[in-house]
Amino acid sequence: MLVIRREQWDEMQNSLNLEFENRCLAELRASYPEKLKDVDEDVLRDDVRGGLGKTGRFRLKDDGFIVEFLKYTVEYGRDFPDLEETLWAREILDNGFLTEEQKMTALARHRTLEIMKD
């Protein structure tokens, strides 16, 4: 029988977390090259970690949806969705009756309508 010690488990988890953070950083840099070109790697990593901390609050578990959420933090600011101008997003994300897919679809729909208004 294979036994994994707590330290080994923690090390594996930390490695997976770091790997996911790195994928998020790469995706954000690829999606927003101009906006993020002057942003220091450590600053962006801190922003990603802050955003990842929020995703649990909104019950976002799917990697793709988490990356999409992080993209909103790049677009609207690191305090998304707690900013006065993005309270619409917090209402969507806090809605416990919506699945994570429905939440992300509603956010995308709202963003599209915003773009169409401009």
Image (cartoon, grey):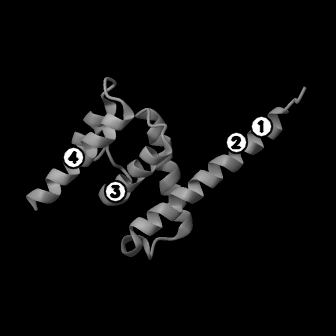
Q: Which mark is residue 109?
A: 4
Q: Specify the amino acid type for callout 2.
A: Gln
Q: Specify the amino acid type for callout 3.
A: Gly
Residue at coordinates 10% horizontally, 62% vertically from top-left? 118
Q: How many marks?
A: 4
Q: Which residue is mark 3?
A: 77
**Quick check: 45 left or right of 57?**
right
Give the structural element (helix, strand or loop) at label 4: helix
* Residue 95 against residue 108 in the figure, above or below: above
Give the structural element (helix, strand or loop) at label 2: helix
- Residue 81 found in image quarter: top left
Earlier sequence position, callout 3 versus callout 4: 3
Q: Specify the amino acid type for callout 4.
A: Arg
Give the structural element (helix, strand or loop) at label 3: loop
Earlier sequence position, callout 1 versus callout 3: 1
Q: Which residue is mark 1?
A: 9
Q: CA distance from mark 4 to mark 1?
A: 40 Å
Earlier sequence position, callout 4 versus callout 1: 1
Quadrant (top left/top right/bottom left/bottom right) for the N terminus = top right
Q: Nearer the viewer, residue 94 or 50?
A: 94
